[in-house]
Amino acid sequence: MAEQNAPDLFTQASTAFDRALQRNFKGLDYFASPAPVLGASPKDLLIQRGTMNLYHYRPMTDEVYRVPLLLVMATTNRGYIFDMVPGQSLVEYLLKAGFDVFMIDWSPPRADEKGLTLADYVLDFLPDAVARVQQETGEDEFTMVGYCFGGVLSLLWAALHPDAPMKNLVTFTTPVDFSKMEMFQAWADKRFFDVDRLVDTFGNCPADYLYTAFDMLRPGARIAGNIRLIDNLWNEEYVKSFRMFDRWASDTLPLAGEYFRETTKKLMWGNELNHGTMEVGGRPVDLGRITAPFLHVTAEHDHIVPSEASAPLIDKIGSLDKEQVTMKGGHVSLVAGGNAIKRLWPKLVDWLGERSV
């Protein structure tokens, strides 16, 4: 019996040795090679003002839907999560499906921009972007698609501009009941967290502070991820995917001080959007005034915006044509990666295709 098993043991040992050797060589490549190039789909910068950048992506089809599409990124992260690499890019997928795609991406606020408020984003930056989209396309109607807090900004804009010719509104993993974001509530507990002191001291909320806050939601995830990376250094596809998502996750943006102070007090502490008492620039926000076709997509395993935090949104929207869909995946894998390619992207294209003529 021992003689029969010897070749198997030898084969297993040889395989393990070869994989370890590959892992070491790949490890050297990992640290020596440059970071992956992300967000490379051809595009033109239309507006660069304050912290806002408005991009227009170049078409990839001869026939394009009449209604343009405006992506609104969350203010804490870079927009290239929508445009990772060819074959794994939501932007590319939408362009090949025939959509005319624009995106609002954000830059770090400068020290002299610490006074930017929520009203600057909702009543100035977003209207400016919408007007430019209309100018570029010659179409009054447009679709707005917001991700995470970009969805919150989109909701606030839509509620305060109910007569605007918005054809459709889509939000991904967008919170409305901030009391259900339990880890963020613990982190921002006003008994211990002095937001006034932070803003008055630093001016803008530092990116490292926000990055640490996101990391605290799953304190063991980074260590576990690094262990999985070491185990899979021989697997080029795994390493490529890890580097893309790790770069995006760590590329957190600082937030303008007054904007951070205001969102903390109004949303995290006051839960005003959920209670219907929210005001922006002195104007009351009523989500029931949103009547355009509405799609809200949530992630089943979202650790940043739990389903309980986003679930009440659908009932607050005044649209007759509205739909909420919960899909497998997490906060990021819902919109990017293999899971998104199979689930969210086809759903989004099908839903918009019926409503973009």
Image: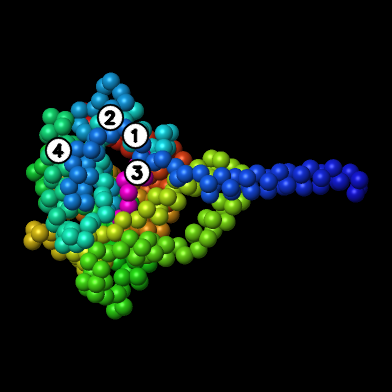
Q: Position of residue 115 (x, y in %)?
A: 16, 62
* Amino acid marked by disc 3: Tyr
- Determine which residue is flagged by label 4: 132
**Residue nearest the observer in this picture, 218 or 227:** 227
Q: For the point 72% across and 47% down, which residue is it?
A: 16
- Determine which residue is flagged by label 2: 58
Q: Are marks 2 and 1 in contact (CB under 8 Å)?
A: yes
- The answer to whether residue 135 is above or below residue 304 is above
Secondary structure found at label 4: helix
- Report how far apart the C-alphas of labels 1 and 3 lie in the structure: 10 Å
- Determine which residue is flagged by label 3: 80
Viewport quadrant of the C terminus:
top left
Side of 33 relative to 340 (left or right)? right
* Amino acid marked by disc 2: Arg
Nearer-N-terminus badge (3/2)? 2
- Determine which residue is flagged by label 1: 41
Q: Position of residue 71 (x, y in %)?
A: 26, 42
Nearer-N-terminus badge (4/2)? 2
